[in-house]
Image (cartoon, coloured by chain):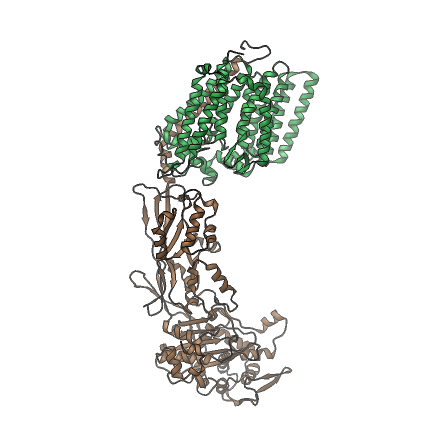
Chain colours: A brown, B green
Amino acid sequence: MALPLRSGETRPLARIKILQGLFIALFSIYALRLFIMQVISGDLYRSRAQNIAQRTTTLIAQRGEIYDRNYDRPMVLNVDSFAVNLTPAEVPKGQIPVIMERLASVLGVPKEKIQKTVPPQYYQLYHPLQVASNVSFTTIGQIAEHMDQFPGVSWQSKPIRSYVDPGSLAHIVGYVGDITQDELKVLYNQGYQQGNIIGKAGIEKEYDPILRGRDGYETKVVDVRGKRVSVENNTLIEPPIMGKNLVLTIDQSIQTLAEKALGQRMGAVVVSRPSTGEILAMVSYPWYDPNIFNTNDISTEYQSLLDDPKKPLLNRAIQSNYPPASTFKVIMTTGILNEKAFPPDKTIECKGELNYGGRIWKDWIGKPGHGPLDLKGGLAQSCDIYFWVVGRDYLGPERIVSYSKDFGLGDLTNVDLPGEIPGFIPTPQWKERRFHEKWQGGDTMNMSIGQGYTLVTPIQMADMVSMIVNDGTIYKPHLLKEIRDPVSGAVIKSIQPEVLHKSDIPPDIFKTVRDNMRAVITEGTARFPVNIKAVEIAGKTGTGEVGLADRWHSWFVAFAPYETDKPEDRIVVSIIVEATNNWEWWAPYASAIIFQGVFAHQTFQEAVKALGFQYLMPQRERRE
Amino acid sequence: MTLKRIGEIDFSLLFASIILTIFGILFIYSSGVTSLGVSVSNEHIKQITWAVAGVLIALIVALTDYRRLYDWSLYLYIFFIVLLIYTRFFGKLVNGARAWVGIGSFGIQPSEFAKITTILFLARYLDQSSRSHNSFFRFLVSCLIVFAPVLVILAQPDLGTTLVFIPILLIMTYIAGLSLRYVSYLALIILLTGILTILPLWETYIMGGRFPSLLFITNSKVVLFLLFSFLLTTLISIFGFNRYKKNYFYWLAYGFSIGTISLLFSFAAQHVLKEYQVMRLIVFLNPNIDARGSGWNIIQSITAIGSGGFFGKGYLQGTQSHYRFLPEQSTDFIFSIFSEEWGFIGGIIVFSLFLLICLRLIRIMKTTSDPFGAYIAAGLSALYSFHFIINVGMTMGIMPITGIPLLFMSYGGSSLLASMIGIGLACSIYVRRYEH
């Protein structure tokens, strides 16, 4: 039925009624849905609402401290410090840039850095954002006194890792930093999270799982932006578990002694106890200050470390390869004796140079040479010609390689620091593969005197001497002595010596080698600096060719006391002073200072004075 | 304009809209209050300003003769289309769309006003053409009148707003007496397109891939085949109808052409729809699929409303809203915060107010002697009811997220003013219902 309307127009009443019905039907369906949601299922939603509103935050565990073997003074402390945060949503509209400027000036941090941490898209956030760490209590006081000028600014305690006067300990202890994405990818299932601190180098990294403890957590009622809501029974806490303290094998006094003995020369020192494998000191120069990683401008400092051509971040004791030079003759001696390749009493005439393979091979001493030398003399005088002849004609490259491997060269020592490199032992097969050239006699000659392709690390040299001292056993070098409880100080675990390698060579061979090494000091190349009264030393010098006419690597590896009833008192010293320094032939002198200091219980200055080395020291060092 | 007639205004219509607006202001204020009870936003102040202006404008419009707009409707319509085009190119980029144009912080959303001007112009056309042309032609032109602003708004891009124009078109032509077959033609196409677009998503995400045959829509070979065969059938039927004048040919053509077009549109939709739009559809089907991302809003809204219970949690006491779990509280989800705090009681009151507005508009449609006025009322009823159905449905989880506001209640000057103008027009029509 149509309404009486203007002609030609149909406005059906029926349709309007249908539309009306449609509206009523739709609204009723919606009302029903609302009823179901709110009245019938209301409880379900109420409980869901409650769950969404709870949030958990982590309570960070305190990281373990690190001590030297005497357990009296920590090398690393967690120092109370503050981090300053800005919660952008609590700052009145439009004030954020002003607040950031004020913060920048009171904290002493560039404004751009704060602006980078709080970009405009975060201006609505209720989450506190850290704008600076390592803030002093005084600065916090300044902010607190003028709190009205700093809306939205808060602070919290954030301990930083403070390295107490580290010096050369930097390479051993390492440093920490925030965990990166790449590290998280690998370690995600070991409980690490974004924002955690993780060790990046050294002991901090090697024993990070022990040092870090376990974070606790706190559950509270918050809104979706993380803002805490004031409600009773708000929090649920699981307390954090503190990290364990580590006691290292390092002896601070020996470390300082070694550090000063090496001085400002590029190189490395390793002092170890052969009977257990404990490392008493490890120095690599140049070192760096790990405390820079706690400042607010890490990136510039770190970049300058990376850019430094002297590579201060490199731990030369375990991460740097050098040709062993004449120190290798110790291995040669062992091989010659064990294989009975050449009678030890038989002499070889050293004329100062040798003609082989179409060129002249010059002994370091030059013409007219050493004269006739037997095995002991050859080692004592470090005669190249003796070892060239015996190595090339009597021992042969295969056996030299096999003895090198027996002494652990070319392999990792598995010391408990990250980043160790294994050195390198060449073989005839390797040379064929690599250079497509046959192994020549000249290569054997080079190898016999520790030049050529052979590469070792200072710690491998220390292990080499340890094997000779221990009659064929090498104990795994390690830096960790004990793990202790942070609260009570009780020992949780004590690290026992572990055998890295045991050789079949009979003990009497090693005795002879030790005797020959003593001859190096009593009558050989090291007799002037190293023949000291405080203790009897036995060792071997080494002067490595690097291709320069006036500079060489200076090696000295030794042990003391030479003869004793208590073998557990012996220490091994392995030093290299790189050819990059001014030429001083310093390694033997440094060793002497170290042995003097250790066995006469003297400091560096006292040892230098006792040995009469003052005149050798440049002005600067003498005043130390 | 005459003040004498002020007593004849349909007060229930006016007051219903004013009450809804007041509710809106109250809850815009609530949405700006933090969990500590501190108000951090002044949106409610702005809304009050617009509300006052809106009511004044509504009264002014109510007291003027709407017939004056009869001639002006064309110019208004064209003006706003031009403004829309301008906005598309020079408007401010907000949330990825250029829908806003203005100077400094003063601006308008032309698309809101375009809804009113399109209603006006379409009403005029339907009135004018009632004698002169046949149903089919009128329907076609009506579609064109609506598609013009739709295309420009789609380009902004703003899919949600364009959707409103479809029920406006359908209901206005329906009430104008256009042949049912044409109205249902369009309605069926829209419905079928919607179903076919959702079908593969439903199959993949909800049914877990158990009915791969339902995925035929995504397979271009199958679609091509179906398209081809449907088109062929349609063409043959048209030919048959022309030749043999048998009715069944007509209906075959009718049905298969619906099929063809729907197939085409839904297939195109799958490739044209942006990922976030597809996500919105998926998440509408099952919000838990992306509970922390796109599904978050729906889950939060449903939780907020559901936890309101019968009486609600109390004004300013809502947890989901004040703890900031609910997003867009002053705009898209204004009903959620309202319902959380005033419960089922409050919800039913809002529903009733909207129903009241629609029923009053129906009454106007029935009783006014001027078809122009009736069609305007029809368009307005489509406008208000559609916004209500989509927005409230979205908050309750029974409609996908489209981003259109709840008229009168959501924060927004342009939509509030446009809605008030609509109310003013309705009152004006009602006052003069016997005059034409």
- Give the x, y percent position of residue A53: 37, 40
- Give the x, y percent position of residue A92: 41, 43
Looking at the picture, tell me which residue is in the foreground, B73 or A489: B73
| Vertical relation: B260 (above or below) A65 | above
Numbered circles on residues, count: 0
Question: Can you tell which quarter of the image residue A109 is in?
Answer: bottom left
Q: Residue furthest right?
A: B243
Q: Residue furthest left?
A: A488
| Vertical relation: A88 (above or below) A396 | above
Image side of residue A382 versus residue A108, left or right: right
- Give the x, y percent position of residue A603: 36, 77
- Give the x, y percent position of residue B222: 62, 33
Residue drawn where x is 38% and y is 60% of the image: A161
Q: Residue furthest top?
A: A4
Image side of residue A141 versus residue B172, left or right: left
Looking at the picture, tell me which residue is in the foreground, A199 or B319: B319
Question: Can you tell which quarter of the image residue A190 is in?
Answer: bottom left
Looking at the picture, tell me which residue is in the foreground, B221 or A377: A377
| Vertical relation: A579 (above or below) B165 | below
Residue drawn where x is 44% and y is 77% of the image: A620
| Vertical relation: A448 (above or below) A6 | below
Can see residue A295?
yes
Residue drawn where x is 62% and y is 27% of the image: B260
- Classify the position of the C terminus of chain B by image quarter: top right
Can see residue A509?
no
Looking at the picture, tell me which residue is in the foreground, A302 or A89: A89
